[in-house]
Amino acid sequence: MSELEAKRREIAELIALELGFGDLDGLSAADRAAVDRQTAETIEGCAPGEAGSDGTEPAADCSEANIRLRGLLRQFRALQVLRSDEADARLAEEGEVFGREDDA
């Protein structure tokens, strides 16, 4: 399990608790699907850059998310950026990075 996947699981575990479910491993398929759906919506909805003009405001009002969840979301986004940066570096090493002027 990658760090990003592990962080997503931490977020899902917290959401499961907030929804009144127990441990993720003990959930029925339907309950797990509900937790996964809510986790995806929370990650997407609380991602910066979609609603704010400067790219820092989340698309949804995430102020009701508890402090731990907000911290996990920040860590998840940092891991996403790190993964993207690592992919860019790998492409650059392979000579696959082009400037915008190269776009046709």
Image (tube, helix red, strand yellow):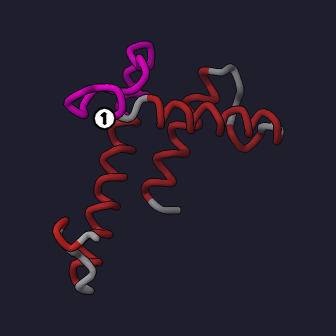
- Identity, as a three-letter code, of the amino acid under mark 1: Gly
Q: Is residue 38 left or right of residue 32?
A: left
Q: Is residue 46 above or below residue 40?
A: above
Q: Residue at x 65, y 39 (%)?
A: 36
Q: Is residue 85 left or right of residue 41?
A: left
The secondary structure that dominates the magenta segment is loop
- As rendered, which of 90 and 73 lies closer to the eye? 90
* First to last magenta residue range: 49-71
Tell me residue 40's x, y (percent). Answer: 56, 38
How many numbered circles does the render carry?
1
Tell me residue 53's x, y (percent). Answer: 23, 27
Q: Is residue 36 left or right of residue 62?
A: right
**Quadrant in the picture for residue 91:** bottom left
**Is 59 contained in the magenta span?**
yes
**Is 88 contained in the magenta span?**
no
Tell me residue 102's x, y (percent). Answer: 21, 73
Residue occupied by mark 1: 49
**Quadrant in the picture for residue 18:** top right
Q: Residue at x 39, y 44 (%)?
A: 76
Q: Is residue 7 left or right of residue 40?
A: left
Tell me residue 46's x, y (percent). Answer: 41, 29
Task: Give the SS element for disc 1.
Answer: loop
